Amino acid sequence: MALRDSQGVASANDQGMGITQATFNGRDAAQIPDKNDVCIIALGLTESSRVDVGVSGIDTDEACDLVERVTEIVEPKLPEPPR
């Protein structure tokens, strides 16, 4: 997990496998798979900040499945997104 205090979800970088923009419990989010067996979900805190939740060390598809489950635990602990 990483806090990015000057980068919002919109500034997430494609790691070669595309970025899927989404919302997660009403929060801006992006899923960022990586061909190096990594998958990250970026969760927006504000327009210019986010938390990245990542899983690595297993197949990328499995990492993306697992990071979704981890994100379900992490997201409710974050501050409410601005409305």
Image (tube, grey):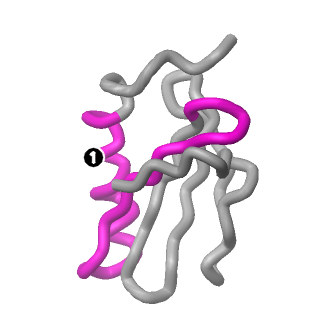
Percent position (x, y) of residue 61?
A: 39, 72
Query: Residue at horizontal 51%, vertical 79%?
Result: 34
Name which residue type carries label 1.
Val
Query: Residue at horizontal 34%, vertical 23%?
Result: 76
Q: Is mark 1 on a helix, strand or loop?
A: helix
Percent position (x, y) of residue 30?
A: 60, 50
Q: Is residue 9 left or right of residue 54?
A: right
Q: Is residue 64 left or right of residue 74?
A: right
Query: Residue at horizontal 39%, vertical 62%?
Result: 64
Nearer the observer, 79 or 18: 79
Q: Mark 1 points at which residue?
A: 70
Query: Residue at horizontal 69%, vertical 11%?
Result: 83
The image quadrant of residue 32 is bottom right
| Extreme residue in the bottom direction | 36
| Extreme residue in the front direction | 6
Q: Does the magenta stretch include residue 25?
A: no
Q: What stretch is highlighted in magenta?
A: 45-74
Percent position (x, y) of residue 38?
A: 40, 75
Q: Quadrant of the N terminus?
A: bottom left
| Extreme residue in the top direction | 83
CA neighbours of label 1 inside 10 A, class few (<14), some (14 to 19), many (20+): some
The relative height of residue 44 versus residue 40 in the rendered view (above or below) is: above
